[in-house]
Amino acid sequence: MEEKSIIIIGAGIAGLSTGCYGQMNGYHTQIFEMRDLPGGLCTSWKRKGYTIDGCIGWLMGSGPGYNYYQLWQELGALHGKRIINHEEFLRIVDNEGKALIIYSDLDKLEGHLKELAPEDADEISKLIQLAKTCSTFNPPIKKAPELMGLADLIPFLFKNKQFLKINSKYRNITLQDYVKKFKSPFLRKMFPFLLVDLFSLIMMLGMLHKKSAGYPEGGSLEFSRGIEQRYLNLGGKIHYSSPVTEIIVENNRATGVKLLDGSIHHSDIIISAADGHATIFDMLGGKYINKKIQYYYNHFPVFPSKILLSSGVNRTFDDSPHWIIFLLDTPIVIGGQEYTSLGVEIYNFDHTLAPHGKTVLRMMFDTDYTYWYDLKQDLDRYQMEKKKIAETVISILDKCYPGLAALVEMIDVATPITWERYTGNWKGSYQGWQLTEKTMPPFRMSKKLPGLESFYMAGQWVEPGGGLPPSALSGRNVIQLICKQDKKHFKTSFPY
Ligand SMILES: Cc1cc2nc3c(=O)[nH]c(=O)nc-3n(C[C@H](O)[C@H](O)[C@H](O)COP(=O)(O)OP(=O)(O)OC[C@H]3O[C@@H](n4cnc5c(N)ncnc54)[C@H](O)[C@@H]3O)c2cc1C
């Protein structure tokens, strides 16, 4: 029997992954991507000889012992790449120069925290123990959640009893609230600069400890290129510079796509791995929704967008930690919002990103999409704002590293409008739906739309919490669902 054909919209990590697993299972797949590069949000770009990394800070599953590692192996994403695990993950420096250091090794971190705050030794031990328990949690990847039954669920619940307890007890505690447990004014002051909530913090510490949140040398575009190559080697086809404007539906069955150039392409199944809002409300004209979906798009919060300021400087930072947050004496205003700290990622650990003797610095700020949307209506004001941000940040950096301003050779400011224009992501969001009480598992967003046959969605807009592993996994899961529908055994393989 002739194998079915699948059209995939979008060559981000989800689209590429969907294509790889489709090919592994004998489907004829092709991807239509509006840009001329793979990766979507997982990308990098060049300016004046420097490479700006637009994505990966840490990659879950970058090391063995974690199921996501198998996913990246199947996708050929890490092949030949050196994985960098930072011994010191983050340093926060206060106005007097005193530092809180987040070591990746939990025992080393425990020692450091107790040195800083011996009066909080008990609470620190508890925190470290929580992170150690979280480090044992390993998200399952074998079966799509939609296909799991009680026989899968019961062993999962049993195995992860401790972790699930921690999750339900701590997931709603902000670090602002948590720090009240500390007696040390220093820890109380510094901890809220780490992350927003306690559960994310202990999860992150657990993954770092397990060496499963590293950085693949070469950066985000190289990582995406690895999966692109895997897809092409499996026989897939990618059509770049091919924006899809419409999903063609006949008798409530998706049968093809129409591109911006007017051409029409048919297949048995269509999978959109592009932005969720654009897929549902533009490409399908809002015809396949129900109250639930409408509710998600009206009420669920999305991850805020980001300003990403990158700078190329003509100097090295050999002895510097790779990520420092400086607390500021006077707050700065960036994109209409006040910030009391400046976080700087120093790419002294990836020499492929800058010419010899030079370094890329990266700074990110959460920002409000509507501020930038309004500003964009007047291009001159938009450009002025970007220039102002660059000047403000460089002047602060110059105080942290005297003489740095004179060594700046490149500056690049990406805003929510950049992400929106480049990837089509709704509100310029960098990670889709936020994880909240309502969107946490067991909540699951359907990968199908009501009343529409032969159509699926993959990617961060059907995986609340977003990020690279869930996006890639959603592609694997969608192909499992299709195999199940076609009564086929789902297969995977390794390239090397
Ligand atoms: C600054 C930043 C830092 C991040 N850091 C991390 C990190 O450290 N770790 C982590 O796990 N995650 C991180 N993320 C999040 C992660 O990048 C995303 O969650 C993930 O890449 C989403 O993948 P996706 O394939 O679902 O979506 P996307 O990457 O948005 O891919 C969608 C693709 O569809 C294409 N497309 C859209 N519309 C059309 C159309 N009409 N026709 C054809 N093609 C179309 C787009 O061009 C794009 O290529 C970060 C994101 C950003 C922006």
Image: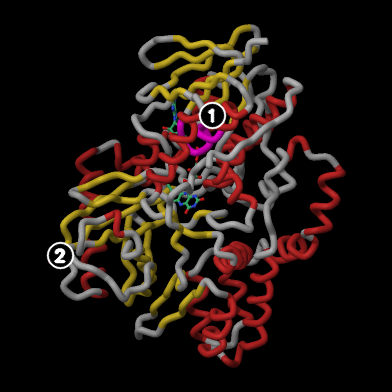
Q: Is the magenta stretch mostly helix, strand or loop?
A: helix
Q: Is residue 488 magenta?
A: no
Q: Is residue 340 visible?
A: no
Q: Is residue 163 left or right of residue 407?
A: right
Indicate yes or no: mark 2 CB to ligand 1 under 8 Å.
no
- State which region is magenta: 11-17
Q: Is mark 1 on a helix, strand or loop?
A: helix
Percent across and percent down for residue 128 are 64, 76
Quarter of the image containing the N terminus?
A: top right
Can you give x and y, in whole percent of width and height, for residue 466 in the image?
A: 56, 46
Indicate whether 252 appears above or below 310: above
Q: In which quarter of the image is residue 346?
A: bottom left
Q: Residue at x 52, y 65 (%)?
A: 195
Residue pointed to by mark 1: 19
Point out residue 267 in the picture as x, y percentages from the top left corner: 56, 13
Report whether 372 appears left or right of 140: left
Please name the residue shown 30% across and 54% down the image: 352
Q: Does the magenta stretch include residue 15?
A: yes
Q: Which amino acid does label 2 sit on?
A: Leu
Q: Which residue position is annotated with label 2?
A: 407
Does residue 71 sit above or below 290 in this rendering?
Answer: below
- Residue 481 is left or right of residue 374, and the answer is right
